[in-house]
Amino acid sequence: MGANGASGYESLERAGDDAPDEQLDPGFALATVEARTTRGGRWVRTRHGTWVDASELGAARPSGFQGE
Protein backbone atom coordinates (compact mmCIF):
# COMPACT_ATOMS: atom_id res chain seq x y z
CA MET A 1 0.00 0.00 0.00
CA GLY A 2 1.00 3.57 -0.49
CA ALA A 3 1.67 5.92 2.41
CA ASN A 4 -2.02 6.87 2.60
CA GLY A 5 -3.46 3.41 2.05
CA ALA A 6 -5.80 2.77 -0.88
CA SER A 7 -9.49 2.55 -1.76
CA GLY A 8 -10.93 -0.78 -2.89
CA TYR A 9 -13.94 -1.34 -5.13
CA GLU A 10 -15.96 -4.48 -5.84
CA SER A 11 -16.72 -3.36 -9.41
CA LEU A 12 -14.29 -1.87 -11.92
CA GLU A 13 -17.23 -0.26 -13.76
CA ARG A 14 -17.96 2.05 -10.81
CA ALA A 15 -14.47 2.27 -9.32
CA GLY A 16 -13.60 5.83 -8.43
CA ASP A 17 -17.17 7.08 -9.01
CA ASP A 18 -18.82 5.91 -5.80
CA ALA A 19 -17.59 5.68 -2.23
CA PRO A 20 -15.09 2.81 -1.90
CA ASP A 21 -16.32 -0.57 -0.69
CA GLU A 22 -13.30 -0.85 1.56
CA GLN A 23 -10.35 1.20 2.75
CA LEU A 24 -6.99 -0.58 2.71
CA ASP A 25 -4.55 0.48 5.41
CA PRO A 26 -1.04 1.76 4.64
CA GLY A 27 1.85 -0.62 5.15
CA PHE A 28 0.06 -3.78 4.05
CA ALA A 29 0.86 -5.86 0.98
CA LEU A 30 -1.59 -7.35 -1.47
CA ALA A 31 -1.38 -9.87 -4.28
CA THR A 32 -2.72 -8.85 -7.67
CA VAL A 33 -4.02 -11.23 -10.31
CA GLU A 34 -5.08 -8.87 -13.11
CA ALA A 35 -4.39 -5.37 -14.39
CA ARG A 36 -6.50 -3.21 -16.70
CA THR A 37 -6.18 0.28 -18.09
CA THR A 38 -9.49 2.14 -17.96
CA ARG A 39 -10.98 5.35 -16.58
CA GLY A 40 -7.77 7.21 -17.31
CA GLY A 41 -5.60 4.98 -15.15
CA ARG A 42 -4.28 1.53 -14.40
CA TRP A 43 -6.31 -0.65 -12.04
CA VAL A 44 -5.34 -3.96 -10.44
CA ARG A 45 -7.57 -6.72 -9.09
CA THR A 46 -6.61 -8.53 -5.90
CA ARG A 47 -6.96 -12.25 -5.22
CA HIS A 48 -10.14 -11.36 -3.33
CA GLY A 49 -11.70 -9.56 -6.30
CA THR A 50 -11.14 -5.98 -5.10
CA TRP A 51 -10.13 -3.35 -7.69
CA VAL A 52 -7.51 -0.80 -6.60
CA ASP A 53 -6.11 2.18 -8.49
CA ALA A 54 -2.46 1.24 -9.10
CA SER A 55 -1.39 4.84 -8.47
CA GLU A 56 -2.39 4.36 -4.80
CA LEU A 57 0.07 1.48 -4.39
CA GLY A 58 3.76 1.56 -3.57
CA ALA A 59 6.52 -0.85 -4.45
CA ALA A 60 7.35 -3.61 -1.97
CA ARG A 61 10.83 -3.42 -0.54
CA PRO A 62 12.79 -6.42 0.76
CA SER A 63 13.64 -6.62 4.41
CA GLY A 64 17.19 -5.79 5.42
CA PHE A 65 17.16 -8.72 7.86
CA GLN A 66 20.01 -11.20 7.49
CA GLY A 67 20.52 -14.34 9.52
CA GLU A 68 23.81 -15.56 10.85
Image (cartoon, helix red, strand yellow):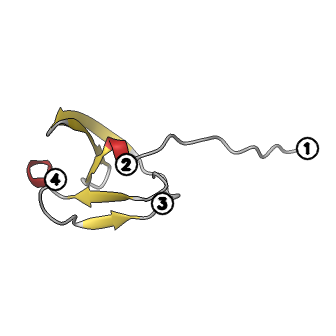
Q: CA distance from mark 3 to mark 2?
A: 10 Å
Residue sitting at the far left? 13
Q: Are marks 4 and 2 in contact (CB under 8 Å)?
A: no
Among numbered discs 4 and 1, the one appearing first in the sequence: 4
As drawn, the label of residue 15 is: 4
In x, y percent, where is residue 62? 65, 41
> Against 19, is 45 above or below?
above
Q: Secondary structure at mark 2?
A: helix
Residue situated in front as seen by the camera: 54 or 67:
54
Q: Secondary structure at mark 3?
A: loop
- Residue at label 2? 56
Q: Amino acid at mark 3?
A: Pro
In x, y percent, where is residue 45? 27, 45
Q: Amino acid at mark 1?
A: Glu
- Residue at label 3? 26
Q: Amino acid at mark 4?
A: Ala
- Residue at label 1? 68
Q: Secondary structure at mark 4?
A: loop
Q: CA distance from mark 4 to mark 2?
A: 13 Å
Q: Residue at x 54, y 42 (%)?
A: 60
Q: Amino acid at mark 2?
A: Glu
Mark 1, residues whose alpha carbon is within 10 Å: few (<14), some, or many (≥20)?
A: few
Q: CA distance from mark 3 to mark 4?
A: 19 Å
When asked about the image quadrant of residue 38, the answer is top left
Q: Are marks 3 and 4 in contact (CB under 8 Å)?
A: no
Among numbered discs 3 and 2, the one appearing first in the sequence: 3
